[in-house]
Amino acid sequence: MEGDFERVLISGDAIAARLDELAHEIQRDYPRGPITVVVLMKGALVFAADLMRRLPRLLELECLNVASYHGATTSSGTVEFLDARMPDVRGRRVLVLDDILDTGRTLGAVVGALRGEGAEEVRCGVMLAKERVREHDIRAEYVGFRIEDEFVVGYGLDYRGRYRNLPYIATLRREVVDA
Ligand code: IMP
Ligand code: MG
């Protein structure tokens, strides 16, 4: 597996240090009361698990399964909700966590749906945000790292279902993507 990567973009240590800062910002912005964290599966699983444990506060956890059809390395344009029902977020302050903000379609659709479910407030946190023009005008209040518009894997992010378990974020060798 190690031979599949071109370069390490963000090390595990850099991720850990940045998560400490993000957790600090979140604790500062939500000084009291419970929040509901909605984790977008599967990509945000690792990020959410590490971030949540840095938040010593009342918190409820919900998971949402969405498919944005990234079979290859580019977005297809459809966002599908795969769960039988949406989490109950009526009157809640919600923090949506995703792995990466790319076109913005996924977070745009999810934020809209959660507002539709009656959430009092919806904010977004992402591990990565690609520097690009978004197709959906959505902003994340909490961003781990801003990266160039290139395809990355690791720390929850996959290519065809693989590499989510890498403890760092890396780019793939062209041969692996073309294979
Ligand atoms: P968006 O809807 O285009 O913003 O894309 C969000 C989703 O696309 C993420 O939750 C990822 O699953 C996937 N994605 C976008 N860019 C990458 C990448 O560089 N590596 C792996 N997955 C990505
Ligand atoms: Mg994915």
Image: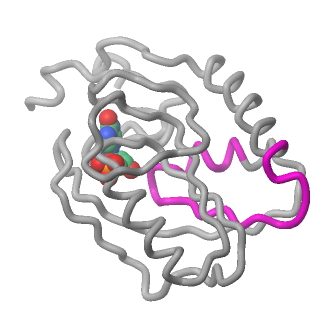
**Left or right: 168 in relation to 37:** left
Q: Is residue 163 visible?
A: yes
**Left or right: 142 in relation to 166:** right
Quarter containing the N terminus: top left
Q: Give the residue at x 43% y 16%.
A: 9
**Left or right: 132 in relation to 170:** left
Looking at this rendering, what residue extends furthest in the top direction?
7
**Left or right: 153 in relation to 99:** left
Q: Is residue 161 visible?
A: no
Residue 150 appears in which quarter of the rendering? top left
Q: Horizontal and vertical percent for residue 29? A: 79, 47
Q: Give the residue at x 52% y 45%.
A: 140
- Residue stretch in magenta: 28-51
Q: Give the residue at x 9% y 32%.
A: 179
Magenta stretch: residue 39 in it? Answer: yes
Q: Horizontal and vertical percent for residue 126? A: 53, 43
Pick the residue in front: 125 or 172.
125
**87 relative to 125, above or below:** below
Looking at this rendering, what residue extends furthest in the front direction?
137
**162 relative to 62, above or below:** above
**28 relative to 92, above or below:** above
Number of marks: 0
Q: Horizontal and vertical percent for residue 55? A: 82, 47
Q: Horizontal and vertical percent for residue 24? A: 81, 36
* Rendered image coloring scheme: one colour
Q: Give the residue at x 65% y 67%.
A: 121
Looking at this rendering, what residue extends furthest in the bottom direction?
84
Magenta stretch: residue 36 in it? Answer: yes
